[in-house]
Image (cartoon, grey):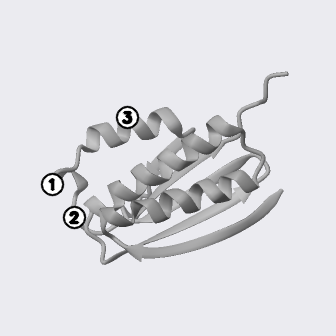
C-alpha cells in the first residue's frame, strides 16, 4: 500500500545532512518501521546525502517514497566521480549503505542513487 511521497531539495553541502537525516527519520516513524529500522533509514539518508554531495551537484534533490513495508529514497547526483572528492571515504559510505539498506544502487545513467529499506518482521 502506497503511503505517500515527499520531495526535498537542499544545497549539496554536507552541513545540510541533518535536514535530510531528520526528514527521513520523521517519515520513517509514520510507517510501520520499528526503532531499529527508523535508525537504519536515518543513517542511510545521511550517508546517501554525503555520497550525493561528493558528486558535486548544485543542489541535491531527495525523494522519499513510503509504503507499508518499505522506504525508498532517491538522491540526485552531480557529474563528479565521488571517488575524486576530497575528504570523502566512498568505501566507508558503501559499507554503511550495504549494512543498513536492503538495496542500494546508482542508476544506469549515473544521475541517481537509490536506496531501499524494508520493514523487518517484528519479533513476538
Q: Earlier in the sequence, mark 2 or mark 3?
A: 2
For label 1, the residue is 84
Disc 2 element: loop
14 in relation to 36, above or below: below
Residue positioned 67% across, 38% down in the render: 35
In the rendering, at what x and y percent does residue 85 appear? 17, 56
Q: Residues within 10 Å of mark 2 (few under 14, many from 20)?
A: some
In the rendering, at what x and y percent does residue 53 appear? 31, 63
Q: Earlier in the sequence, mark 3 or mark 1?
A: 1
Residue positioned 57% across, 62% down in the render: 23
For label 3, the residue is 95
For label 2, the residue is 80
Marks 2 and 1 close (CB-CB < 8 Å): yes
Marks 3 and 1 close (CB-CB < 8 Å): no
In the rendering, at what x and y percent does residue 15 appear? 33, 64
Structural distance between the alpha carbons of marks 2 and 3: 20 Å
Amino acid at each position: 500500500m502506497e503511503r505517500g511521497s515527499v520531495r526535498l531539495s537542499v544545497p549539496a553541502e554536507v552541513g545540510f545532512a541533518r535536514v535530510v537525516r531528520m526528514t527521513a527519520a520523521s517519515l520513517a516513524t509514520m510507517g510501520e518501521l520499528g526503532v531499529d529500522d527508523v535508525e537504519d533509514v536515518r543513517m542511510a539518508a545521511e550517508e546517501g546525502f554525503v555520497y550525493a554531495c561528493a558528486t558535486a551537484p548544485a543542489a541535491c534533490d531527495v525523494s522519499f517514497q513510503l509504503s507499508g513495508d518499505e522506504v525508498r529514497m532517491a538522491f540526485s547526483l552531480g557529474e563528479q566521480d565521488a571517488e575524486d572528492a576530497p575528504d570523502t571515504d566512498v568505501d566507508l559510505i558503501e559499507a554503511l549503505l550495504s549494512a543498513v539498506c536492503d538495496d542500494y544502487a546508482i542508476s544506469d545513467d549515473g544521475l541517481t542513487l537509490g536506496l531501499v529499506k524494508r520493514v523487518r518482521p517484528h519479533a513476538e
